[in-house]
Image (tube, rainbow, N blue to C red):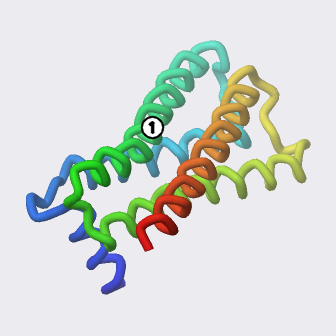
Amino acid sequence: MKIFKKYLHSFLGKSKNLATLFLLLITMVLLIQSTITLFVPTEYPEASNSFDIIIRTTLGSLFGYLISSIWVSKKSEYISASSLNLSVIVIASITLFCLITLIVARNNLELLVNADSTTATITQYRDFISAGVGALIGISKQGSKDE
């Protein structure tokens, strides 16, 4: 827990940017909600589809922000190693969460809700996995150049 607090403090910076902390919290809530929609049927699928679109769009924006913030910070040369490490942890966690969810869904197809939003959520998780892996590869290549 102390290590997480250290990384969190470094990630938020000296200004203690609470907005970033809340963006991470919102990301986690939306990821959980999207996963629930894969497995729990809704009574009004037509109405909930509009909400699901909003959730997926917001989640995509947040994940894009989390990935892009690394390169913006690296260019400004004040990013600390612990801040970069927390960024890697966040991106890897989201990527692993999506990957595990897709594996569980793939191995338990009978549990999936038969809805249009299921296909969209699965597609978005696939995109998150690809983007997350790409970001982690880019970070690892950059790290090897810095050494």
Residue 54: x %, y % from top left: 48, 23
User: Which residue: 26% across, 68% down?
Assistant: 80
User: Which residue: 81% across, 28% down?
Assistant: 114
* Nearer-the-camera pick, 56 or 114: 56
| Quadrant position of the N terminus in the picture | bottom left
Residue 79 visible from this viewpoint: yes
Going by the image, does 55 lie left or right of 71?
Answer: right
Image height check: is 111 above or below 8?
above
Pointer 1 residue: 64
| Quadrant position of the C terminus in the picture | bottom left
Residue 93 visible from this viewpoint: no
Image height check: is 124 above or below 130?
above
Residue 97: x %, y % from top left: 62, 56
* Nearer-the-camera pick, 27 or 113: 27
Most distant residue in the left direction? 15
* Nearer-the-camera pick, 59 or 132: 132
Q: In terms of image quadrants, where is residue 42?
A: top right
* Nearer-the-camera pick, 69 or 103: 69
Residue 130: x %, y % from top left: 66, 43
User: Which residue: 55% across, 60% down?
Assistant: 141
* Residue type, numbered disc 1: Gly
Q: In terms of image quadrants, where is residue 17?
A: bottom left
Going by the image, does 87 lie left or right of 97?
Answer: left
User: Which residue: 45% across, 37% down?
Assistant: 64
Residue 82: x %, y % from top left: 32, 73
Most distant residue in the bottom direction? 2
Image height check: is 76 above or below 3?
above
Going by the image, does 90 lie left or right of 119?
Answer: left
Q: Residues within 10 Å of mark 1 (few under 14, many from 20)?
A: some
